[in-house]
Image (cartoon, helix red, strand yellow):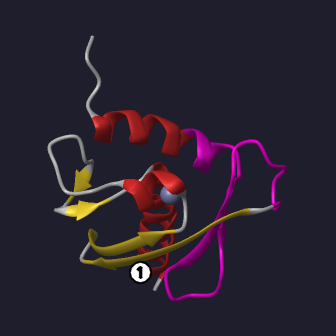
Amino acid sequence: MVISPLELRWRRAKRLVAGGYVHPQGDDGAFVVSSQAGAKGGPGYRVGVAMENGRLVRASCTCPDFSKQMAGPGVPLLHGVRVCKHILAAASVELLIDEFFTGAR
Ligand SMILES: [Zn+2]
């Protein structure tokens, strides 16, 4: 079975979220996502995500995967935005927090 670049990163992102590697830094869409080899809360990559109505509109990450990606057919896009596994993980948590909080009001 062939896995798309986006699907591959979704699978890895799920492990990051489930494993507690995603650490929100305040309430402006900033996160630190621990590198998989590191301990929880250890060194990681800085991730920024901006969501509008449940969709990703802007994203950045300091990891090599995101830095080296150029435009092309192999580049994973979500909602037209270039992503890596850290961005997907952070966006999932951001959305979860937003929806839960909105639902609670
Ligand atoms: Zn990344």
Left or right: 95 as drawn, with respect to 28: left
Q: Is residue 42 above or below residue 28?
A: above
Range of the magenta residues? 15-42
Pick the front one: 18 or 99? 18
- Say what amino acid the circle numbered 1 marks: Thr
Please state the horizontal and vertical placement of residue 55, each as a whole percent of the image: 25, 69
Which residue is tagged 1? 102
Residue drawn at point x = 34 percent, y = 54 percent: 69
Q: Is residue 29 above or below residue 33?
A: below
- Mark 1 lies on a secondary structure that is helix
Please state the horizontal and vertical placement of residue 2, each as a whole percent of the image: 25, 17
Residue drawn at point x = 51 percent, y = 89 percent: 28
Residue drawn at point x = 24 percent, y = 56 percent: 78
In what quadrant of the picture does the N terminus appear?
top left
Residue drawn at point x = 37 percent, y = 72 percent: 59
Does 61 appear in magenta? no
